[in-house]
Amino acid sequence: MSSSSHKTKQFLHSSLKVFIVLAALTFIGLKVTGDDQLSFPVFWESLRSNEVFSVEHVGILLLLTFLNWIFEIRKWQVLSSSVRPNSLAASTRESLASFTAAIFTPSRIGEYGAKALYYSRGDRKKILFLNFLGNSFQLFMSLVFGMIGLVYFIYHMPLPLKWYHLIWVILISIAPFVLYRFLRKKTWKIHGYSLQSLRNALNRLPRKIKWQVLLYAGVRYFIFTHQFYYFLLIFQIAVPYPLLIAAVASMYFLSSIIPTLMIFDALIKGGFGVWIFSFLGIDQLVVLVVVLAVWLLNFGLPALIGSYFVLKFKPPKKLPA
């Protein structure tokens, strides 16, 4: 009976891993071939005609992608090391495998569960919190620099905005901070966790770790925004650097405040990007091609690599009750 139960668990475990990998591959394939606004042949030809595949451009773009994920992995290594010592290799395995699980789930929920599986049951609640903290710090960077970029963009561009549009921009910008101030004294609970318990957990985390994670989140933001900027340079977009990077920051800011499936991330960014870059006279096709290319490098490629680690995953041998 015990042997039969063990074989059943092994079968279900293997089936789940295969399902996650197939789901991730399917979602990536749908993103590349199923976009109504941009067909794959047009996407590929646009990259080819603009010499994106030259040795120089490929080298720089892959380097930026590598750096982006190195800092994401280092961010997780620093956070997870507060639970148990974690090597760079182990952090890489956990980060990429969890990313594969996250790519087809709303708001990257799959990432939380996948990372937790690498740890004993007694540590999983803390791992969930640490992953939430790492993502929150990254979101914080997108909001802060995005607000600065959006204000700069609005100030320097003759946008056809009414007074109530500006009010909406201000409200969206300050809403996270107002919401936090309003809720910080409340005792509401979400799935058993109160804001007070989250604050206590944050306060218990060493200040050095929090500053390191914030630094890595800032470096990551700098890297992927400038990767987008470099793509625009390849497409020979002649717009001054401050205005162009402000437009990129604005796009990331607006897309960051909408929870969505990661597979729709490029679609959301593409919609905001087309609107924002239209004020700079940048063709819609260029924006859509760049958004999809950046998505493939920073999301699709890591998810593909992570598929290997998902298939190789083995739960911890000792799982204390």
Image (spheres, rainbow, N blue to C red):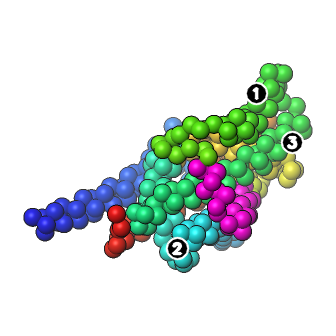
- The residue that disc 3 covers is 152
- Find the residue positioned furthest to the left: 1
Instruction: Estimate the x, y position of residue 23 in percent, counting from the top left.
Output: 38, 52
Q: Which corner quadrant of the image does residue 229 belong to?
A: bottom right
Pointer 3 and pointer 2: residues touching (CB < 8 Å)? Answer: no
**What residue is pinned by disc 2?**
84
* CA distance separating discs 2 and 1: 44 Å
State which region is magenta: 197-225
Vertical arrangement, residue 201 with respect to residue 105, above or below: below
Viewer-nearest of labels 3 and 2? 2
Q: Of the residues shown, which amino acid type is indicated by label 2? A: Arg
Q: Residue type at mark 3?
A: Tyr
Element class at badge 2: loop
Residue under circle 1? 168
**Inter-mark Cα distance, 3 to 1:** 16 Å
Where, quadrant-wise, is the N terminus in this rendering?
Answer: bottom left
Residue 94 at x, y percent in the picture: 48, 67
Circles 3 and 1, Cβ within 8 Å, touching? The answer is no
